[in-house]
């Protein structure tokens, strides 16, 4: 079943089309704009999730620059307080390549977030040089296994062995595992066999705007969603009219069943769309 959605940021450029965050986030970090983007994305995701009919979690990515912000804890608490979202329903994802200091600000921040009830996940695990070292001493709840390993299952034995190793280590440390990039039934069968707790990928749907996921909302919420279209962030100096804006969207995580059978029907979903010259938030499904 669906257990969480991941908020994904997309820049809809009037000339270049959809620009992925891997392209524009590093530039935003260099220009000092990433904090402004984060100040919009986090509250927007929390507000969106607070109106869902079911208490599903919402995952939000944090950049390395955001982690160095001493006001981040206050911003997270503010987003939760203003939206009314329970802390346990918010999951913050940190890329494994992010520099982390066990004796400094990062450890103190993650420990405080964990104490507040927020879930902490390590994203893209296995692609950096300090994967196992990063697990030592940091309060992670989940490990997201990088899609590069999942895409090589089952054709490459080394990928199978690595995924099995990661799930074993995570289980020993009391952490759950999420298999990223599951796109085929065969891959799903293998991640179940290898002990993954959750899966995420195109097998269960592509990123889509939240307004297109009607099952998340009650009738009153849907009516509100149709008129509340102003949830987009524009780079400084850019403006857009109301008809250009689009409500945030989603991409989903699901818990992986251990006893066969297909727990869901594949859902049709549309890629996020909307006006130009602004960022939109999309959601990606996660299943168990």
Image (cartoon, rainbow, N blue to C red):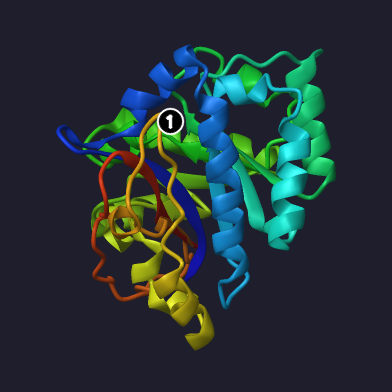
Q: Is residue 137 left or right of residue 235?
A: right
Say whether residue 286 is visible. yes
User: Residue at the spot x=25%, y=56% of the render?
Assistant: 271
User: Residue at the spot x=79%, y=14% of the render?
Assistant: 104
Residue at the left extreme of this rendering: 15
User: Residue at the spot x=31%, y=24% of the render?
Assistant: 23
Q: Which x, y percent locates residue 17?
A: 18, 38
Q: Is residue 117 left or right of residue 163?
A: right
User: Residue at the spot x=62%, y=66% of the render?
Assistant: 50
Q: Is residue 121 left or right of residue 124?
A: right
**Picture quarter containing residue 235?**
top left
**Picture quarter containing residue 88?**
bottom right
Circle 1 SS class = helix
Q: Which one is nearer the viewer's eye here, 15 or 24?
A: 15
Q: Is residue 101 left or right of residue 37?
A: right
Q: Which x, y percent locates residue 264?
A: 36, 74
Say whether residue 87 is visible. no
Q: Which one is nearer the viewer's eye here, 207 or 81?
A: 81
Q: Which x, y percent locates residue 180?
A: 39, 44
Q: Which one is nearer the viewer's eye here, 91 or 128?
A: 91
Q: Which one is nearer the viewer's eye here, 125 or 44?
A: 44
Q: Which x, y percent locates residue 211?
A: 38, 68
Say how many tags the image has: 1
Asked if residue 55 is positioned above or below residue 119 in the image, the reply reads below
Query: Around disc 1, counting alpha carbons within 10 Å, would you say few (fewer than 14), some (14 to 19), or many (20 or more)?
Result: some
**Picture quarter containing residue 131?**
top right
Question: Which residue is identified by label 1?
Answer: 162
Asked if residue 68 is positioned above or below residue 175 in the image, the reply reads above
């Amino acid at each position: 079943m669906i257990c969480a959605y991941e908020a994904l940021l997309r820049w809809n450029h009037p000339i270049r089309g959809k620009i992925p965050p891997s392209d524009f986030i590093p530039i935003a970090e260099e220009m000092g704009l990433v904090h402004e983007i984060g100040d919009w994305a986090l509250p927007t995701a929390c507000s969106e999730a607070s109106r869902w009919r079911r208490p599903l979690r919402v995952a939000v990515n944090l950049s390395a620059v955001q982690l160095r912000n001493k006001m981040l804890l206050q911003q997270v608490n503010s987003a939760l307080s203003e939206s009314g979202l329970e802390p346990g329903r918010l999951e913050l994802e940190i890329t494994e390549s992010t520099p982390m200091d066990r004796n400094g600000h990062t450890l103190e921040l993650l420990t405080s977030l964990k104490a507040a009830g927020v879930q902490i996940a390590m994203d893209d695990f296995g692609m950096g040089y300090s994967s196992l070292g990063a697990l030592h001493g940091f309060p992670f709840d989940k490990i997201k296994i990088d899609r590069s390993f999942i895409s090589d299952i089952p054709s490459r034995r080394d990928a199978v062995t690595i995924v099995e190793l990661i799930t074993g280590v995570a289980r020993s440390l009391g952490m759950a595992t999420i298999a990223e990039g599951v796109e085929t039934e065969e891959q799903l069968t293998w991640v179940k066999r290898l002990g993954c707790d959750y899966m995420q990928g195109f097998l269960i749907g592509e990123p889509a705007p939240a307004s297109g996921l009607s099952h998340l909302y009650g009738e009153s919420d849907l009516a509100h969603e149709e008129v509340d279209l102003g949830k987009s962030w524009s780079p400084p100096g850019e403006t857009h009219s109301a008809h250009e804006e689009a409500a945030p969207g989603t991409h989903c995580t699901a818990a992986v069943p251990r006893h066969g059978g297909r727990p869901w029907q594949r859902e049709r979903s549309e890629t996020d769309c909307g006006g130009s010259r602004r960022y939109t938030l999309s959601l990606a499904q996660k299943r168990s």
